[in-house]
Structures are given as structure tokens and as C-alpha cells.
Image: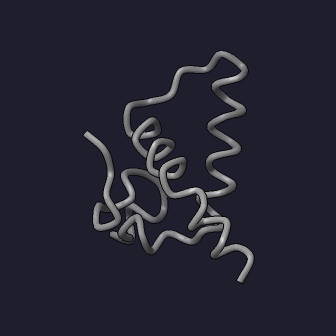
Amino acid sequence: MSLTDDDIMPFGKHNKAGTKMKDVPAKYLDWLLGEMESDVSKGKQLYENQKLVMDYIRRNIDAIHQELEN
């Protein structure tokens, strides 16, 4: 399974608000990727929903960075 643009963010404040992945702010996704990568590098295990979000961000990283530049 993988997340699509139309799936709801699976955790956090954007989940509670029912925000679709494509509408989660790029700044938040960029920050979140850094946090999750840091956790992994420290040997922490991610929950399945975190892994799905990390995969989504990585697949869309170019668009996220482009949005950050605008």
C-alpha cells in the first residue's frame, strides 16, 4: 500500500482536520521527513503510517521542494 495525493494524512493535526496529502503544507512535509530520517538514523522504529508518509514524501520530494521555493 502507498499513499496517494487524495489520501488523508494518517496522523497528527492534519489527520484530525481531514487534510489530503496533496494539501499538507510543503514546509511541514519537508520538516517531517527530516524528523523521521533522524529517528531512523538513531535506530528508532517507525510506525507503519509513518513509513507510508515517508515514502509519499520521498516520491514527491521534487514537487515539495519546488513549492518551498515559490
Determine the residue positioned at 65% across, 72% down. Answer: 66
Task: Write down the quadrant of residue 19 in the picture.
Answer: bottom left
Query: Which residue, as the protein is rendered here, is positioned at the far front?
Result: 62
Residue 12 vs residue 61, the one in the foreground = 61
Please identify the quadrant where the C terminus is shown.
bottom right
Identify whether 8 is placed above or below 70.
Answer: above
Query: Which residue, as the protein is rendered here, is positioned at the far bottom?
Result: 70
Determine the residue positioned at 45% across, 65% down. Answer: 14
Task: Write down the quadrant of residue 18 in the picture.
Answer: bottom left
Residue 6 image position (x, y, % from top left):
29, 67
Query: Which residue, as the protein is rendered here, is positioned at the far top?
Result: 43
Residue 63 image position (x, y, % from top left):
56, 67
Identify whether 36 is placed above or below 31.
Answer: above
Left or right of residue 60, residue 35 in this image: right
Query: Count the marks: how many?
Result: 0
Identify whether 44 is placed above or below 15.
Answer: above
Task: Write down the quadrant of residue 47 in the picture.
Answer: top left
Left or right of residue 27, residue 49 in this image: left
Please identify the quadrant where the N terminus is shown.
top left
Residue 50 image position (x, y, % from top left):
46, 39
Residue 32 image position (x, y, % from top left):
62, 50
Residue 44 vs residue 23, the one in the foreground = 23
Identify whether 13 is placed above or below 53.
Answer: below
Q: Looking at the image, what colour scheme do you see?
A: one colour
Left or right of residue 56, residue 34 in this image: right
